[in-house]
Amino acid sequence: MINKLISNIKKTNAPIVVGLDPMLNYIPEHIQKKAFADLGETLEGAAEAIWQYNKGIVDATYDLIPAVKPQIAMYEQFGIPGLVAYKKTVDYCKSKGLVVIGDIKRGDIGSTSAAYAVGHLGQVQVGSKKYAGFDEDFATVNPYLGSDGVKPFMDVCKEEKKGIFVLVKTSNPSSGEFQDQEINGRPLYELVGEKVAQWGDELMGDGYSYVGAVVGATYPEMGKVLRKIMPKTFILVPGYGAQGGKGADLVHFFNEDGLGAIVNSSRGIIAAYKQEKYKEFGAENYADASRQAVKDMIADISGALESR
Ligand SMILES: O=c1ccn([C@@H]2O[C@H](COP(=O)(O)O)[C@@H](O)[C@H]2O)c(=O)[nH]1
């Protein structure tokens, strides 16, 4: 799947991911009204609104982008109907040729991680049959429980040719509370980065590993160091746009081949029509505003990479 991600990035010339993180208050009134008229002000109604909203954004942007990253929390808040909308979104994006990164941030003791890995990336055995669960292409993994929490994901990735992005240095303001703590003079995120590079050696695609890393756009200096520690690791970079990251901050997350990183923006794209800059599109044309925001993001990142 890392090879498909790279091939999609080359095809679109766009090292970006659209984060599908729908919140009800981003969803234009006309979509909510229709969904509630059909299904009531229920969890099912909310899930239908989310699904229609996502579909509009995907239809308007899929030809420009290599990948999407649905954030499962945004769907889980609506219970089972929300998870149905998550699955519909995953399947629809795949049918459009997009790589789907499930932002699920799982990781547990080995046996539980194995179940998460099967549920999201693998196939579950039921009697003599096997069934795929959510069936994303990549999943995000929390490494805090150590190797036995990550290895089950790697085993499934090996079997299914899928991939993971392991949290190394997260974009949030308090990520340093634990991640920057020094052990023998080295910050924890560097030690995790080294481990990710080692894990990645076991699961190589053509040039890059199936084991990727998450490093926040909001910490560009740390990104530069981690790029060197993990030369063959693809880095998923959240924190662009709504969290303050800009193209100019991101050049060191990429390798000299122009690859090695993929930058996520969620609110900055899916709720673009709410920004002053894209206000002229209006709520009815929210998806066109998202398309323009995608073009602007690509230009910002490509411009920064070209002038480095
Ligand atoms: O370090 C991390 C890891 C994951 N995220 C996720 O990315 C998106 C960011 O959303 P924006 O609206 O573009 O800020 C969201 O799903 C986070 O859970 C992250 O931000 N930082």
Image: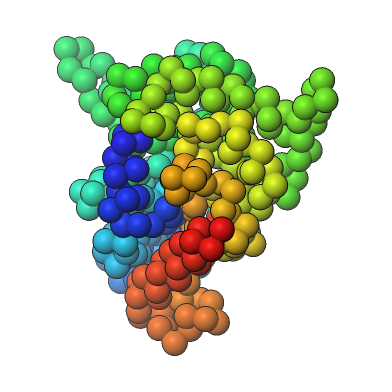
In the displayed structure image, the side of residue 127 where residue 265 appears, left or right: right
In the displayed structure, 191 sits above or below 34; it is above
In the displayed structure image, the side of residue 179 where residue 239 appears, left or right: left
Instruction: Say which residue appears at 59% left-offset and 48% top-offset.
Output: 252
In the displayed structure image, the side of residue 119 where residue 262 appears, left or right: right
Q: Which of 61 and 92 is in front in this view?
A: 61
| Picture coordinates of residue 33, whole percent (x, y) | 36, 73
Q: Quadrant of residue 239?
A: bottom right
In the displayed structure, 141 sits above or below 79; it is above
Q: Which of 129 and 267 is in front in this view?
A: 267
In the displayed structure, 5 sits above or below 289; it is above
Q: In which quarter of the image is the C terminus?
A: bottom right
Q: In which quarter of the image is the N terminus?
A: top left
| Picture coordinates of residue 195, whole percent (x, y) | 59, 22
**Residue lying at the far left of the rendered structure:** 128
Q: How is the image coloured?
A: rainbow
Instruction: Say which residue appears at 51% left-offset and 76% top-offset.
Output: 274
Q: Which of 234 and 228 is in front in this view?
A: 228
Instruction: Say which residue appears at 20% left-offset and 12% top-offset.
Output: 127
Q: Can residue 179 be seen in this view?
A: yes
| Picture coordinates of residue 91, whole percent (x, y) | 26, 45
Instruction: Say which residue appears at 26% left-offset and 16% top-offset.
Output: 125
| Picture coordinates of residue 229, whole percent (x, y) | 61, 31
Q: Is residue 239 visible?
A: no
**Residue lying at the far bottom of the rendered structure:** 280
